[in-house]
Structures are given as C-alpha cells and as structure tokens.
Amino acid sequence: MTDLSGQIAKSRRGKRGASTGLVFALAALVVLVVAAAAFVALVLWPRWPAASVAPDAPALPITVGGVLFNVPPPAIRVAMQRRPGAQERLDLAFLWPSLAPPDPTARPAPSELLPPIDRLFITIEPQASALSPSDRVRTIYPRYLAETQYDGPDGLKVISFNDDSPYRGEDLFFDPTAQPGFVARCSRPGRAGTPGMCLYERRIEAADVTIRFPSDWLPSWRALSRGIDALLAKLRPSG
C-alpha cells in the first residue's frame, strides 16, 4: 500500500510538473506571437509623412533617376515632393516669360472664363525606355504622320498625325533647319475655349524631362526654346 501511495504521489508530482511546463511553453508562445504581431504592425501600419520643406526655403538637392537637380521649393507643384533626396517624380511649374517660380499663396481672381495659362509645366521622371525623345521623333513618329506638311509660325513646319494613330488630333511642329532641333507635339484647341497644349521632351542623362505649354506660344518658339535651355541649365548644378 505504501509503495502504491508513493507511486501515486510521484505521478501527481509528474503531472503537476508537466502541466507547469506546458503552461510555461504556452505562455512563451503567446509572448512570441504578440511580439511578432507588434513587429508586423509597426512595419505595415500607415504613418504620416514627414513635414515637407517650406516653399520659401532655399533650392533643394533632389535626384530623379540618379540625376541631381537643384529645385526651388515654390516651383514644386506637389507638397509631398518638397523635400531633398531621391524621388520617383518631380512636378514643377515656372512662370513665363520670367521663368520665376510662381507665388504659392497667389489665387486667381474669380471669373467665368478660363484664365490664360502663364506658366511652363515640367515633369521629371526616370527614363522609361532606352529610346530617347529625339530617337522617338526619328523612328516612331514618322510611322503615324501624314504625307503633307505645311508652314507653321515663324519658320516652323507642321505635319498632322493620322486619324488612326495613337496621336490622333495632334500635330507635330518642328524646326526644319536643325537636326535635332525644336520639336513639339501639340494637341488642337478644344471646345469651350480649352487651349491646345504642346509637349516638348528632353533627356538629361538617365532622366526624362517633359515640358508642357500652350500651343498659343508657338509664334514665340525661338524665345521659348532659349528659355527652356536656360531653365534646365539652372536646375542642373554646375559641374
């Protein structure tokens, strides 16, 4: 009887020890699960972005596609882009013809008419393909152009894109005296006074620059071309 009682006591102690070990293991597992969940939440939980630089701050060093630009903050159209460092895209605006950044606090006066466009709009992105803008003009556009060209403003030539092309409703304006020279792809004015808009493209190292401006400015394309060159040179730091 004594031996049996001892065995039962040992069995109970063993069960209590096993239960204690099981509880400890479960507690440790719970701690690990909670810690893992906390880590995932910390990594994936959306965070408020850091405050952007004030518009009146000095020019910001910003890289796009590995290319360095010095950009005045008031020219940056998207507040989240007003910060130094690498970015996937830059959206800028500069007044024409002064090429100064617009006043971020200015507001147009109320009017029933569309206000005239008074600025250049610039988008800078990493190059999307190996084909440069000038290569696209030489190799892609001719597939979709009409056969007839006609005279444009101040010495430019104009060729319309075919109606069955991806550029339907647009015209190609180019300087026939320079290769490559000034080339702009422009939409035609629309209804309700919507202005036609032109795209002028440049590549700077590994960054593609697209400049948009109203087609009404084409009669002053020579001054516009010089202004764009000066503006891009100012955005690129010397050396």
Image: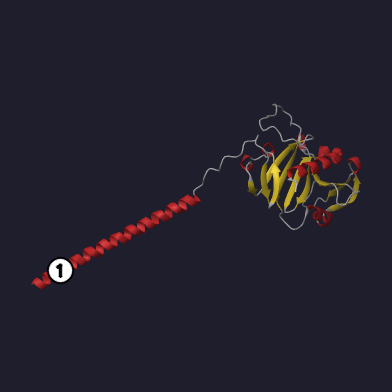
Left or right of residue 93, residue 156 in this image: right
Instruction: Name which quarter of the figure residue 30 lies in.
Output: bottom left
Left or right of residue 117, residue 43 in this image: left
Instruction: Name which quarter of the figure residue 190 lies in.
Output: top right
Count of all numbered marks drawn on residues in the image: 1
Q: Secondary structure at mark 1?
A: helix
Q: How is the image coloured?
A: secondary structure
Position of the N terminus by quadrant: bottom left
Query: Could you say where residue 72 lies in the image, as x and y percent from the top left?
Result: 69, 39
Residue at horizontal 63%, vertical 44%? 84
Query: Could you say where residue 191 lies in the image, as x and y percent from the top left?
Result: 77, 37
Residue at horizontal 90%, vertical 40%? 154
Which residue lies under the disc numbered 1? 8
* Neighbours of disc 1 within 10 Å: few (<14), some (14-19), many (20+): few
Given the current orientation, which residue lies at the most extreme front position? 239
Given the current orientation, which residue lies at the most extreme left position? 1
Q: Nearer the viewer, residue 158 or 42?
A: 42
Position of residue 57 relative to residue 158, above or below, is: above
Q: Nearer the viewer, residue 45 or 186?
A: 45
Q: Is residue 187 visible?
A: no
Q: Is residue 33 visible?
A: yes
Query: Could you say where residue 51 lies in the image, as x and y percent from the top left?
Result: 57, 39
Instruction: Name which quarter of the figure residue 227 lies in.
Output: top right
Query: Could you say where residue 144 lies in the image, as x and y percent from the top left?
Result: 82, 54
Say which amino acid is labelled 1: Ile
Position of residue 33 relative to residue 4, above or below, is: above
